[in-house]
Image (tube, rainbow, N blue to C red):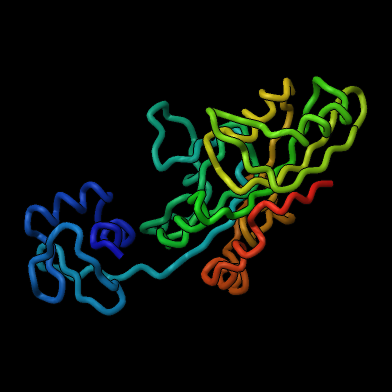
Amino acid sequence: MRLQRALARAGVASRRGAEEMIAAGRVRVNGVVAELGCTVDPLADAITVGGRRVRPVETAWIALHKPPGYVVTRRDTEGRSTVFDLVPDLPGLTYVGRLDVATTGLLLLTTDGEAAHRLTHPRFAVERTYRVDVRGRPADHIRRALKKPIVVDGRRVDIVRYRVRETGRGTSEMMLVLTEGRNRIVRRVCEQLSLRVSLLVRLSHGPVRLGRLRPGDWRYLTTSEIRSISVGHDHKNSRKDGSRT
């Protein structure tokens, strides 16, 4: 991985701060002054900053049930609570895709930046499942609308599967499976369909499911889940196949 990423992951500094350290000649790799852009293996290479050895960080994966009102960021300029207030303070821990402040459900956090990239980059088309409670149109109208292409910002939204059922009193429950994570994309789809959202929960991200985690609770991922992420099992059936229910 890039040296600046390795330093940030080890908790030495932010990515930008690490770049400044490298540019200032304070970082050495195997005794040689490092240059910006060089790649390292944190487990095999001896990395030092100002003469002090940087210890590699053990890979960690966390599944959090994000409650409403928490911001997905390390620090919030408005002083709001962040998801990092709810999980262990691990060096290099970062979130895997955002959820807006009102959205709840599964949020993954990890110290493995490259795997986080695979789970979020559109090229890998990793599935995310959402439950959305809406009102504004009958369920059969929603189904007909979802059969047609939905375009947001000039680009078609990749909805792999969906299910819609009426829940009474003018409300419906939608289950949407998407392979992208554009900002507020589920809410924007609902806006396109003239639907008002009363509840939005992410139920899964790749091979990891929310399960019975309560809001505000977290757990470490299982070995099986981590293996599925690393070998890409979550990608194999993620391209749109036209199946709809």
Is any part of residue 121 visible from this angle?
yes
Residue 59: x, y in percent?
Answer: 44, 68
In the foreground, 24 or 55:
24
Q: Viewed as shown, does residue 183 lie left or right of 114?
A: right
Q: Residue furthest right?
A: 168
Expressed as whole percent of the image width and height from the top left, the position of residue 27 reads 13, 63
> Is 21 left, or right, of 159 in this rendering?
left
Image quarter of the N terminus: bottom left
* Label tally: 0
Foreground pick, 12 / 173: 173
Q: Nearer the viewer, residue 115 or 153?
A: 153
Establish if 35 lies above or below 149: below
Image coordinates for residue 222, horizontal then vertical, percent: 61, 70
Residue 197 on image: x %, y % = 72, 27
Residue at the spot 67% in from the left edge and 23% down from the top edge: 191
Q: Residue at x 41, y 26 (%)?
A: 78
Report whether residue 96 is seen. Answer: no
Q: Answer with the quarter of the image where residue 167 lies.
A: top right
Classify residue 151 by image quadrant. top right
Left or right: 147 in relation to 63 = right
Q: Residue most toward the bottom?
A: 44
Left or right: 31 in relation to 196:
left
Picture residue at 33% right of the left edge, 59% below the top: 9
- Residue 137 against residue 230 in the figure, above or below: above
Q: Quadrant of the rendered structure where residue 193 is?
A: top right
Tell me the residue at 78%/51% (across/down). 243
